[in-house]
Amino acid sequence: MTKEIRSFKHLLGKLEGISEAQLEAHFGLYEGYVKKLNEIEEKLTKTDKSLTNYSFGEYAELKRRYTVPYNGTYLHELYFDNLVASGKPSAKFEELATKSFGGFDGWKADAKATGLAVPGWVVTCIETTTGRLQNIQIMEHHIGLPVNHIPVLVLDVWEHAFFLDYKANRGAYIDVFFKNINWDVVNERIALFFR
């Protein structure tokens, strides 16, 4: 199945502190992940699986790298979808933040510290076995997502997400990200889990 590239042009001019030039550059990177995902999926259907082993094989290498464009595609979509300031944190998010971090400010401080500590992603997840929130780091799109974690808020902290606007000041970008959260989307993701 071919993955379609989604358009996020509706974000242009709607984000506080994130320029149109920064967004356009970011959209191009996302489109590259979708194209590479489609390329790998097509190659997987045509590659001779009988020649595969752990040491080397085209099929083995395609499988090893598959998660990079897959997560690169879907993490970007989750990130873009949870942008454009809207709503406020739901009572359920506030409850989870209190249970997991001592309150909303504790969640926010932990999310920022997590973002300052990694070039990659910060994903606020519901850990399914405890029902608690966790801010996890994902590196290279495919390293660090634990099992039993459902993403509810995604923050891209790769330099490509902020460098045109903030140079190397990742912290200033994270502060601006918090102002642009679409809480309606985040609240819906949480509500789906707790149905």
Image (cartoon, grey):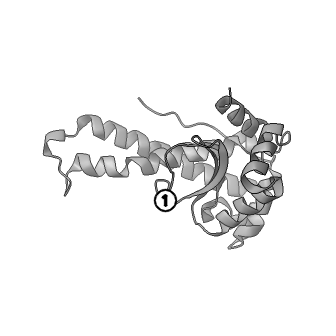
Residue 103 horizontal side relative to residue 121, left or right:
right
Tell me where residue 45 appears, x and y as whole percent.
28, 34
Q: Is 143 left or right of 162, judged from the image as shown?
A: left
- Tell me: residue 85, above or below residue 108: above
Q: Which residue is mark 1?
A: 140
Q: Quadrant of the C terminus?
A: top right
Counting the numbered discs, the total is 1
Identity of the residue drawn at 66% across and 63% down:
115
Residue at 51%, 49% (x, y): give it.
Answer: 72
Q: Residues within 10 Å of mark 1 (few under 14, many from 20)?
A: some
The structure residue drawn at horizontal position 83% and vertical position 38%, both measured from the top left corner, is: 91
Q: Quadrant of residue 138?
A: bottom right
Residue furthest top in the image: 195
Residue 120: horizontal and vertical position, in percent?
57, 61
For image coordinates 73% across by 32% down, the residue present is 188
In the shown orientation, is residue 94 left or right of residue 72? right
Could you tell me residue 4's position as x and y percent?
52, 33
Q: Amino acid at mark 1?
A: Glu
Question: Which residue is situated farthest in the bottom direction here?
Answer: 168
Q: Is residue 182 visible?
A: no
Q: Quadrant where the N terminus lies?
A: top left
Q: Nearer the viewer, residue 179 or 101?
A: 101
Quadrant in which residue 112 is drawn:
bottom right
Q: Is residue 61 visible?
A: yes
**Furthest residue toward left:** 51
Question: Position of 134 compared to 182: left or right?
Answer: left
Q: Position of residue 55 (x, y in %)?
A: 19, 58
